[in-house]
């Protein structure tokens, strides 16, 4: 009987300890999950083997999807999943319908991440532009990571649906987000915010409302902030600006610099390899264009 009582006491004590530790374990598991998702995202974006990432990325995306399914209101996991889906679509997906699906998912997850991660941020896509702009202007530097990733995924979604005028109209929202990020954290994402602002200003010729000279300054800022490590900034500078204003010398100079540059850069390696591929295509087609 005494043995039974002692065993029962040990069981009760163990149960009480487990109950006391439950919330701490839950936080630990959540932290480990977030760390894993962040490390996975970093490993993909920093991998120099394009073929390996192309072949393996779908499995990674499914894995991250499983983490999101387990914690569907975790803004960090939603943010990481959105970034990976958008990056995969931009780097590897050629089929238009598949690109639309992936970018729609990335945008949806980015909106959800903002909804769960920032105050009064649900339903941003459905708000009238004035109310949306008021929300953007009220944000602080703490909002920058989620705002920026939302703008990036939204811009990619617009690009994938460029034949839809209602989608293209959302570029005003993308621009508002990017401008606010540039005010709050000018060097964010190694100048990536200026890269996107440059693209937004050079989407159309001046006769249709484009502002190529403002776009040029943004591209130059993106290159300066990244110290030249963001090769996509030079590629887009050549493609969006130099081709728009027919500056062949600038076009070729930028692309040759990309081809001669190293690809290794923290958080940029994968996209730098893609940038080199695009730079070669632009160089190969330059005679036809100019």
Image (cartoon, grey):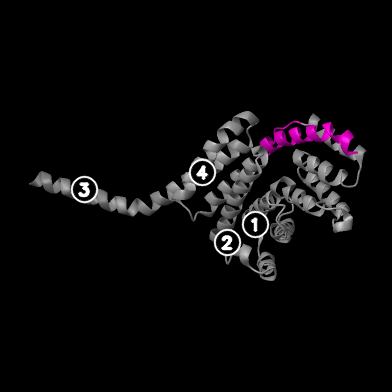
Q: Are marks 1 and 4 in contact (CB under 8 Å)?
A: no
Q: Nearer the viewer, mark 2 or mark 4?
A: 4
Q: Residue 276 sits in which quadrant? A: top right
The answer to which image quadrant residue 111 occupies is: bottom right
Work out whether mark 2 precedes mark 1 in sequence or the reverse, and give the earlier one: 2
Label drawn at residue 11:
3
Query: For the residue labelled by badge 3, is the local secondary structure a helix, a strand or a loop?
Result: helix
Q: Which residue is mark 4?
A: 64
Q: Which residue is mark 2?
A: 118
Can you tell which of label 1 and label 4 is closer to the viewer? Answer: 4
Quarter occupied by residue 231: top right
Q: Earlier in the sequence, mark 2 or mark 4?
A: 4
- Lower sequence index among marks 2 and 3: 3
Magenta stretch? 262-290
Q: Is residue 286 left or right of residue 160?
A: right
> Could you tell whether 256 is left or right of 108 in the image?
right
Q: Nearer the viewer, mark 4 or mark 3?
A: 4
Left or right: 203 as drawn, with respect to 99: right
Q: Which secondary structure is most common in the magenta stretch? A: helix
Q: Of helix, strand and loop, which one carries label 1? A: helix
Q: From mark 2 to mark 1, how far is it between C-alphas?
A: 9 Å
Give the Cα distance between marks 2 and 3: 43 Å
Measuring from the top left, give residue 199's x and y in whole percent: 78, 50
Q: CA distance from mark 2 to mark 4?
A: 22 Å
Q: Is residue 267 above or below residue 13?
A: above
Q: Nearer the viewer, mark 2 or mark 3?
A: 2
Q: Residues within 10 Å of mark 4 (few under 14, many from 20)?
A: many
């Amino acid at each position: 009987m005494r043995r039974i009582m002692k065993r029962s006491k040990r069981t009760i004590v163990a149960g009480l300890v487990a109950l006391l530790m439950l919330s701490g374990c839950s936080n630990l598991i959540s932290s480990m999950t977030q760390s894993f998702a962040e490390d996975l995202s970093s490993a993909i974006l920093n991998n120099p083997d394009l073929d390996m990432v192309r072949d393996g990325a779908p499995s990674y995306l499914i894995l991250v999807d499983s983490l999101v399914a387990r914690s569907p209101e975790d803004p960090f996991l939603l943010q990481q999943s959105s970034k990976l889906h958008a990056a995969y679509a931009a780097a590897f997906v050629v089929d238009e319908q598949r690109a639309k699906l992936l970018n729609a998912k990335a945008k949806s997850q980015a909106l959800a991440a903002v909804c769960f991660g920032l105050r009064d941020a649900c339903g941003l896509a459905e708000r009238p532009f004035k109310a949306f702009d008021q929300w953007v202007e009220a944000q602080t530097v703490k909002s920058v990571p989620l705002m920026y990733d939302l703008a990036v995924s939204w811009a990619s979604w617009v690009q994938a649906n460029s034949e839809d005028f209602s989608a293209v109209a959302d570029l005003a929202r993308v621009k508002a987000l990017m401008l606010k990020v540039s005010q709050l954290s000018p060097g964010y994402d190694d100048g990536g915010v200026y890269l996107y602002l440059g693209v937004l200003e050079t989407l159309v010729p001046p006769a249709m409302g484009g502002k190529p000279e403002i776009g040029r300054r943004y591209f130059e800022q993106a290159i300066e902030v990244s110290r030249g490590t963001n090769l996509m900034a030079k590629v887009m500078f050549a493609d969006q600006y130099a081709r728009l204003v027919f500056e062949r010398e600038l076009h070729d100079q930028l692309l040759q610099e990309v081809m001669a540059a190293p690809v290794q850069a923290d958080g940029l390696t994968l996209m730098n390899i893609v940038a080199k591929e695009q730079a070669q295509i632009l160089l190969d087609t330059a005679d036809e264009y100019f």
